Amino acid sequence: MPEPAIALIDCNNFYVSCERLFQPWLEGRPVVVLSNNDGCVVARSQEVRALGVKMGAPWFQLKDLARQHGIIAFSSNYTLYADISNRVMSVLADFSPQQEIYSIDECFLDLSGFKHLQYSDYGQHIRATIKQWIGLPVCVGIGASKTLAKLANHVAKKRAEYAGVCDFTSLPMAVRERLLAQIEVGAVWGVGARTVARLATLGIVSALDLQRAPPKAIRAQFGVMLERTVAELNGEACLTLEMIAPPRQQIMVSRSFGAAVYALEALQPAVTAYVTRAAEKLRRQSSLAGSVQIFIRTSPFKPDAAQYQGSLTVPLVAPTDDTRQLVCAAQAGLQRIYRPGFAYQKVGVVLLELIPEAQRPRTLFDDPAAQARASVLMRTLDSINTKMGSHCVRLLGEGSVGEGRGESGRMRRERVSQRYTTHLDEIAIVRAQ
DNA sequence: TCTGGGGTCCTAGGACCC
DNA sequence: TCTGGGGTCCTAGGACCC
């Protein structure tokens, strides 16, 4: 058996890089991409990081800084990012028979067996190919476990001397330990802010400290997750590559409103719209939901205003993927948790107790004919909406404005770029000089 | 005026049962 | 002196990730 070697390939500032792909003049300029409602920063270019802007910083607090330094902001354009991501992932798939797509901008590749090619040369080849074929900058980290691959990627990103590729498996032990000693423990995958603070009281502050910590004591104080992290840091691969994404166990759709919403009548269309989106995802993975949870809340950032959070899980008579039944359940739940007089900021729905459609339980009260009709109807809706745009045919309760939201609940997206690769009327145009 | 959205896993504690 | 013990299931909440 060859020594295991896992690579983590991660796109640099992915959303920003996607915007730059079609607007090359953004290269070298400070660029951010904002969350829904243009609320906070979710991606920063190197130039913006250098200004000290933190991930998640509210955009309205940065207006002055942005003016001073000419920061250019975009609303998030998920249609574009998802399409670019698919292209990147399909190119990366050619570099190994085993790929796990971990997030929109990251994947693991199993490189065990490619040692004869020199992992770091292979990493450079991957990097150059993505740059040339797609146009995006990526970094590559290689290690004996996923956690080490993540950490190697961190080094590849932070330290210019590695030229975007860091292979822990071929570094001398002393060099690797020197690197780990310089990395804060919070940079280790699975170690968040809470754990950092608790580890500090034990004198564990660097990645190297954690690697050397006694596993049993870690387990006793922090649980099995962190014990596993310690093992992974020591080169013992505990996490396997998940080549096939398992079906989701819950499906959530929620949004903040552009401005506070008070009336039940204004919440209802949003709920119908979110259940509709969630049900589409449910059918895409061929699952049925056994219950629907609904939640509403006021803004936690306005402590002076009256606060209220309500949530309720509504069981369904039988598991279903029929949007109409799911909407009925969610609306019934909304009626029960709604309290008048509050300034609602967010509403969401969650589909729970998901089971594969193939395991639909049989009951005495089944009506196979009705169920077959419902199934045909849902499939027809999905195929029309796939072809003609996602809100082409919808339930009346979803309303008629924008993304199916009432006028009051409309989302702010003032700085969105074009869907250069997926909509013919927005396609990128190249002009010859 | 303006602070995202969507997931996973683990643990503790209560209810219930024998 | 001494409240039984142990298993399972469920839920809420915490922590983490991108």
Image (cartoon, coloured by chain):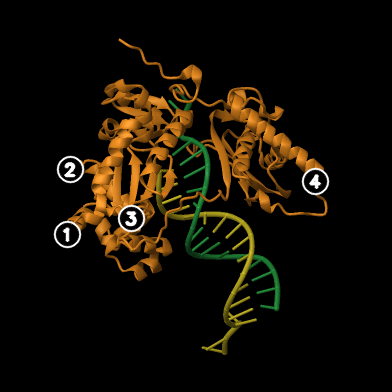
Chain colours: A orange, B green, C yellow
Element under label 3? Answer: loop
> Same chain, marks 2 and 1?
yes
Disc 4 marks a residue whose amino acid type is Pro
Q: Which residue is mark 2?
A: A161
In the rendered image, residue A261, in percent from the top left (x then y), is placed at 59, 30
> Rounded to the nearest whole Å, what is the CA distance between mark 3 and mark 2?
25 Å
Q: Which residue is mark 1?
A: A174
Q: Label 1: few (<14), some or many (≥20) within 10 Å?
A: few
The numbered mark at residue A112 is 3
For this rendering, which residue is in front, A356 or A315?
A356
Q: Is residue A332 visible?
A: yes
For this rendering, which residue is in front, A342 or A368?
A368
Element under label 1? Answer: helix
> Rounded to the nearest whole Å, what is the CA distance between mark 2 and mark 1?
17 Å
Q: Residue furthest front?
A: A116
Which quarter of the figure is the C terminus of chain A placed in? Answer: top left
- Disc nearest the viewer among 3 and 1: 3
Q: Is residue A267 visible?
A: no
